[in-house]
Image: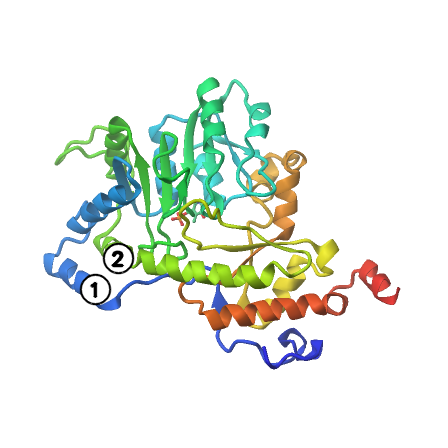
Amino acid sequence: MRNKIATNDLAVFGGEPCFSNKLHVGCPNIGDEQAMFRRFHEVLERRWLSNNGPCVQELEEKLAAYTGVKHCVITCNATVALELAIRALGLTGEVILPSFTFIATAHALQWQEITPVFCDVDPLTHTIDPKRIEQLITPRTTGIIGVHLWGRACDVEALAEIAHRRKLKLLFDAAHAFGCSHRGKMIGGFGRAEIFSFHATKFFNTSEGGAIMTNEDELAHRLRLMRNFGFEGVDNVVYLGTNGKMNEVSAAMGLTNLESLPAFIRINRSNYELYWRFIKKLPGIRLVSHNEEEQSNFQYIVLEVDESVAGISRDTLIEVMSAENVMARRYFHPGCHRMEPYRSYYPNAALLLPNTERLCRQVMSLPSGTATGADAVTDICALLKFCLQHALEISERLTDCPRKKLALVA
Ligand SMILES: *Cc1c(COP(=O)(O)O)cnc(C)c1O
């Protein structure tokens, strides 16, 4: 950041980029390489690469113990895990979920011809707003899927109360929330089942992977059958199933990464605190906080950019940062309800989603995770500060918004 004195020094205007390599949101957290190679070697020696191998079984036991949930059913990814849980619980008709989530939450429903009914979120926590759910319930509604966005738990108690009273099944997409707690209890055991993602970009990864956690024996049994084509024993198919199995190489990676979890959290937390110290002073920028009273993985650094105060839009800020090789991302722009097929199916969905609409315009995520060092965080913050100090000039040069031009002249 030493190299920026005037706006012309910004890479977007031809200056030298702040970073020579791209910094990404969700660059994988990777544990001890030697331990990983040892486990890969054992997998190859055994020649047991899939079908509920020893690494998968060990990882399931360890994850169940870590979250304190009775059953952990590991899968090839969280999208298939969601599909399995939705089907195993017998959801049909309509299911209520937030639109402010990754598209997979909605697709897992629509894929099985269940209508996703989009609900607005709480403006502060970004999780589904329980007060808006009941107006969306119809005779066809069978369930609610809450999303613990950024690792922050939904209002679990309010959702459970509605689900109980209206006889709906409650599921959680906990893709972001591995290692996080709610009221002192690890996320994983709430609702009928919770789904984690172990995708490369998530806090804890198996390169691709996911899991369904549940405390229900019968549900876990059904999920295991469905995950493996419905096979119960050799040659005996008793259920409609698919292939949702995790392979041994991914499970070995998971076992290794699990050993580094405390280190991942320590680094994420210190990055978050560093970001927090700089960003809290910047006008028009709000850093979405992790709940300090709970355990958290501190994986996501999420900002809301209020253009009317900051003088620069989220999108312009991302354009400037990207040129500097800070690959900040819009989340979850433009919102599930504005993506196909939902945009065509429900053209008026936005009317009921004012908070979601605002967040889809304002939210951006900054590079974080163990690949991002403290020096990088400091430089990213300095760059942000520079952008805000020169907000009007940058905006005026990068957009042809007449209102901005007028504001500059005045
Ligand atoms: C990542 C993610 C998923 C999908 O996970 P995969 O393992 O990539 O299938 C689902 N929901 C949310 C909220 C996610 O962030």
Q: Name the mark on residue 35.
A: 1
Please name whichever residue, 17 or 113, is drawn nearer the observer in this view of the structure.
17
Q: Name the mark on residue 259.
A: 2
> Mark 1 or mark 2, which has the lower sequence index?
1
- Whole-angstrom CA distance, mark 1 to mark 2, is 10 Å
Give the side of residue 80 with respect to residue 293, left or right.
Answer: left
Q: Is residue 96 above or below residue 408?
A: above
Q: Amino acid at mark 1?
A: Ala
Give the side of residue 1 with respect to residue 111, left or right.
Answer: right
Q: Name the mark on residue 223.
A: none
**Contact check, label 1 and label 2, Cβ < 8 Å:** yes
Please name whichever residue, 244 or 130, is drawn nearer the observer in this view of the structure.
130
Q: Quadrant of residue 10?
A: bottom right
Residue occupying image coordinates x 52% and y 18%:
139
Image position, residue 304 (x, y; %):
62, 53
Q: Quadrant of the C terminus?
A: bottom right
Residue occupying image coordinates x 42% and y 59%:
268
Image position, residue 54 (x, y; %):
15, 49
Image position, residue 215 (x, y; %):
29, 31
Image position, residue 177 (x, y; %):
41, 46
The answer, for residue 388, to whether it is visible in the render is yes
Give the side of residue 283 with respect to residue 68, left or right.
Answer: right
Tag 2, which secondary structure?
A: helix
Residue occupying image coordinates x 32% and y 39%:
212
Tag 1, which secondary structure?
A: helix
Q: Amino acid at mark 2?
A: Glu
